[in-house]
Amino acid sequence: MLVRGAVLAVVLLGLVVFSVLLAKVTLTPSPASEDLVTSNLRPGRSLRQYAEDYTFLAACKQAGGNLLLGVPFGLLLPFFGPRRLRMIRMTLLTAVVMAVVELIQGALVSGRAFDIDDVILNTAGALLGYFVLGRRISHRYYTYADVPGASERPEEPEAADPKHAPAKTARTKAARSPLDRFRGR
């Protein structure tokens, strides 16, 4: 239990540090770009612009930076969700958070604009981080965290045939609720 709490504390600290870095990178004004940037609501438009107007290195820096910006979501968010639908929840949460960041960027920060391609690339980066490493480490974490201790014994399933059911001890009978004893279980 102590290890599980420590791991969650480290992951939470990682999310806080990442949030500060995310804010610093995305919400810093860029006055030099003020006349150049425009909002983009059409998926793929910025990516085409990177390919046509930028050098290969600058295009890789733009697209790769947005991909890398999403990777921490794929590594850290799986720790906070149950296994069921973990990838879908992480993907949706990343897309929503990045859309909000882009909206704030476009509305409040000079020299920045909303770009749907940035949201798509950030979300793709989160999926990349999830599939490369996040899924494995969160699975290991939950596997080790859910192992019953030496003092705990998992309950034995009851046999389908009452004739072959194990004999109930006095302790088991006493542990039943009054309603179960009334029903004859």
Image (tube, grey):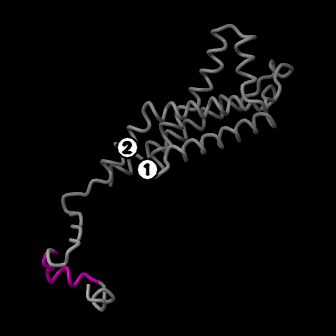
Residue bounds of the magenta highlight: 165-176
Q: Kindly report the distance in space between the C-alpha atoms of the residues bearing marks 1 and 2.
A: 8 Å
Q: Nearer the viewer, residue 34 or 120?
A: 120
Which residue is located at x 20 percent, y 84 percent? 173
First of labels 1, 2 by sequence position: 1
Which residue is located at x 81 percent, y 29 percent? 39
Q: Nearer the viewer, residue 13 or 90?
A: 90
Which corner quadrant of the image does residue 70 belong to?
A: top right
Which residue is located at x 42 percent, y 33 percent? 133
Q: Nearer the viewer, residue 32 or 163?
A: 163
Left or right, 141 with reference to 164: right
Mark 2 and mark 1 in contact (Cβ < 8 Å)?
yes
Which residue is located at x 46 percent, y 52 percent? 84
Q: Residue 77, image x and y in percent?
A: 51, 43
Residue 139 marker = 2
Q: Nearer the viewer, residue 32 or 80?
A: 80
Q: Residue 85, image x and y in percent?
A: 50, 49
Q: Residue 155, image x and y in percent?
A: 23, 67
Left or right, 51 with reference to 153: right
Left or right, 12 with reference to 36: left
Local crowd at mark 2 within 10 Å, few (<14), some, or many (≥20)?
Answer: some
Local crowd at mark 1 within 10 Å, few (<14), some, or many (≥20)?
Answer: some
Vertically, is 179 above or below 137? below
Which residue appears farthest toward the bottom when viewing the image? 182
Q: Residue type at mark 2: give it.
A: His
Q: Secondary structure at mark 2?
A: helix
Residue 83 marker = 1
Residue 27 within the magenta-colored segment of the rendering: no
Residue 173 within the magenta-colored segment of the rendering: yes
In the rendered image, which quarter contains the N terminus? bottom left
Q: Residue type at mark 1: give it.
A: Arg
